[in-house]
Amino acid sequence: MIHLGVNIDHVATVRQARRASEPDPVSAAALAELGGADGITVHLRQDRRHIQDRDVRLLRETVRGVLNLEMAPNEEGASVLDLALAIGPDQACLVPEHRQELTTEGGLRVREDDARLRQVIERLKARKVLVSLFIEPDPATVRLARSIGADAVELHTGSWANAWAACRGRRDCPSLRHELSKLEAAAQAAAEVGIQLHAGHGITYANVVDLLHLPLLRELNIGHSIVSRAVLTGMERAVRDMKDLLG
Ligand code: PXP
């Protein structure tokens, strides 16, 4: 069974739009787990644009499955690393982070001689946190991730998802075949070197089935599409509840 990590960042995005107390991502996490989520994923960004430190602390107390904390491994992210080491999420996914981006763009650049990255991995692993690196689907980067001590790689599926949308899911469409072959080659490399395989970004209800054949795929992290559907499927009930109050 593929493990589903539900990314609830955008519940916090709605809350932060008003700097209010609702919707609370902690409540959303509990409901996601009731719905069958195997884990909850949050990205504590350096600019704290959505998830806040308080959310991560409370989620550590309340999440029953796997708590996966996405974070940047750079110097500016030191306070995030400190929090991670203090609370000990079950899993940490190291991602690149740029202030101007709307969402995580591109995978982490992994270099054999990146002392900072090695140190972050070591410190998290010493805290018994499973460490995953969010990388472009490229066999050489998968091997590098293994050699610097990561337990898992999360393949960035964003380019594949864009190609899927442009090709409307037609499997004979050249750009989609090209993107899928990159994911397949990276998944194969992960199986060869014995590193856990995760994937995420841009995965939707429409495209997800086309990823399920990747060899030894263990985990998918999905956020935007699930939160989007939750807003729509919950709308009718929410309006009815308000109308009831109006008598
Ligand atoms: N995995 C990682 C590492 C991410 O940064 C994100 C986006 O926050 C996701 C998965 C989820 O992507 P999406 O919101 O497009 O499902």
Image: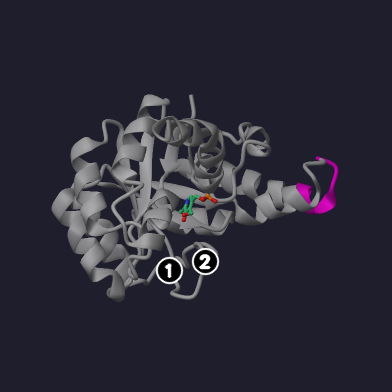
Left or right: where 84 falls relative to 196: left
In this rendering, the answer to whether 177 lies above or below 210 is below
- Do the residues under discs 2 and 1 have CB atoms within 8 angstroms? no
The amino acid beneath tag 1 is Glu
Colour convention of the picture: one colour
Left or right: where 71 falls relative to 129: right
User: What secondary structure is found at the residue carrying circle 2?
Assistant: loop
Where are the magenta residues, as a range?
171-177
Check if residue 147 falls in the magenta segment.
no
User: Where does the image place residue 209, in percent across and percent down from the top left?
Assistant: 65, 32
User: Where does the image place residue 9, in percent across and percent down from the top left?
Assistant: 41, 52
What distance separates the C-alpha of mark 2 from that of mark 1?
A: 10 Å
In this rendering, the answer to whether 2 lies above or below 56 is above
What crowding class fits label 2: few (fewer than 14 Cα within 10 Å), some (14-19), or many (20 or more)? few
In this rendering, the answer to whether 196 lies above or below 158 is above
Closer to viewer: mark 2 or mark 1: 2
Mark 1 residue's CB less than 8 Å from ligand 1 = no
Q: Residue 97 carries which label?
A: 1
Residue 43 figure quarter: bottom left
User: What secondary structure is found at the residue carrying circle 1?
Assistant: loop
Label 2: which residue? 102
What crowding class fits label 1: few (fewer than 14 Cα within 10 Å), some (14-19), or many (20 or more)? many
Q: Camera-side residue: 171 or 241?
A: 241
The amino acid beneath tag 2 is Leu
Check if residue 173 falls in the magenta segment.
yes
Q: Is residue 217 visible?
A: no
Q: Camera-side residue: 159 or 183?
A: 159
Residue at image location 61% in from the left, 32% down from the top: 212
Q: Residue 185 carries which label?
A: none
